Image: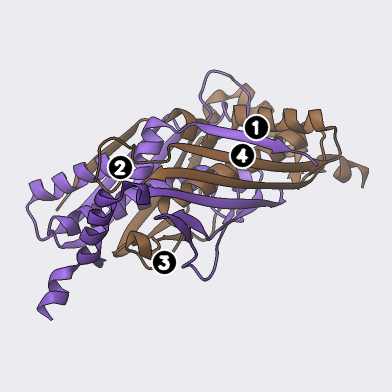
Chain colours: A brown, B purple
Amino acid sequence: MTVITDTIRNGVDTGRMFATLDLIKAQPELAKFQFRATNRWLGGAHNRTSIKDFYAAGGEDTSRTEAFSIDAGEPAILLGTDTGANPAEYLLHALAACLTTTIVYVAAARKVQLTSVESTLTGDMDVRGALGVDDEPRNGFERIGVSFRVRGDASEEKLREVVRRAQQRSAVYDMVTNGVPVAVEVTTD
Amino acid sequence: MTVITDTIRNGVDTGRMFATLDLIKAQPELAKFQFRATNRWLGGAHNRTSIKDFYAAGGEDTSRTEAFSIDAGEPAILLGTDTGANPAEYLLHALAACLTTTIVYVAAARKVQLTSVESTLTGDMDVRGALGVDDEPRNGFERIGVSFRVRGDASEEKLREVVRRAQQRSAVYDMVTNGVPVAVEVTTD
């Protein structure tokens, strides 16, 4: 029982975590991952993404038995019928989820037992950009605000240090703050 | 009937679309929007985002009667139990959904009737960055590939022009390619 108590922290198996890190240090080629999404338009602002397989650790990972199906939409004011959260809101979700999981993993590695992690995100946008009314405002959010409330069995300073480290390591935080090269190709046949 | 046929195109009410554009041109202050998300950790790599209200057109928009609830997770190889797509996959979904909706709206405005819009996205990542094993690889995707198949009652050149215009106007494409300033604040009480 002691072994289990020591290994699982914040719902994360730290034994497996450190074994994974050691394996990737020894064989860096296993660190190449590719994630994928396929999307299909369903009418108006409604479209649906399917997410399942990915490439990881030297081969196709087929451990997921079912695909995740994720619907997007727009509210009435943006000419949709609320068939799902809108794409910009999904970006906020991606950012919140990634920072949260990274906080949880960093805390697990540092022997910090968390009791709660909550966040509120805001994204401010002047829609004249995306609507093509004015070239001055950018299309996307001008800024994003993230407000975390993190509680656990550690000092305030240690909890803040966990969040700082998570910002330094979060995949989506990196992408949203620094941008990513995107190549778009089109077929029409 | 003729009026309805002329106004609704690709499931988008172009009459309302042009009225909205005219209104925002006349009163640019109505273009200030704020989208929001709240997220809560549920254990391990599992967390859930709630999305409902937003600020739009000079006031709180409360037209949504229910919140969208969106679960995130990680696959086994990243120490989760597949409680949802992972955060980086949600970023691909946000990008696919935004480009698709923008294509549909641009086509509607340009009198192009679409029959299908499908896309496949890939994101390549060296997970040594996010796992903190090596400082050299970035945390997020090194690159994202987007492959669209767009069909409709227009020439190949016109369909390609619609996609190009959508890239120039998509909110999430702008954010993912150019980045957004993100301010993080933390409370621990």
Mark sitting earlier along the chain (3/1): 3
Instruction: Tell me the CA gap for discs 2 and 1.
Output: 32 Å
Query: Mark 1 and mark 2 in contact (Cβ < 8 Å)?
Result: no
Mark sitting earlier along the chain (3/2): 3
What mark, if any, has residue A83 been given in the picture?
3
Taking the image as shown, residue A59 lies to the left or right of residue B144, namely: right
Q: Residue at x 65, y 35 (%)?
A: B185
- Which residue, as the protein is rendered here, is positioned at the far left? B155
Mark sitting earlier along the chain (4/3): 3
The type of residue carrying mark 4 is Leu
What mark, if any, has residue B56 been given in the picture?
none
The residue to which callout 1 is attached is: A166
Q: Residue at x 37, y 65 (%)?
A: A76
Mark sitting earlier along the chain (1/4): 4
Taking the image as shown, residue B25 lies to the left or right of residue A116, namely: left
The residue to which callout 2 is attached is: A129
Location of residue B111 (image quadrant): bottom left
Q: Check the residue under mark 4 and report the chain it is in.
A: A
Nearer to me, A62 or B5: B5
The type of residue carrying mark 3 is Thr
Instruction: Tell me the CA gap for discs 3 and 1.
Output: 33 Å
Instruction: Tell me the CA gap for discs 2 and 4.
Output: 28 Å
Nearer to me, A123 or B96: A123
Using the rendered image of the protein, determine whether residue B46 is visible from the camera's viewpoint: yes
| Residue A60 pos. (x, y %) | 48, 44
Using the rendered image of the protein, determine whether residue B140 is visible from the camera's viewpoint: no
Mark sitting earlier along the chain (2/1): 2
Query: Mark 4 and mark 1 in contact (Cβ < 8 Å)?
Result: yes
Instruction: Tell me the CA gap for discs 1 and 4.
Output: 6 Å
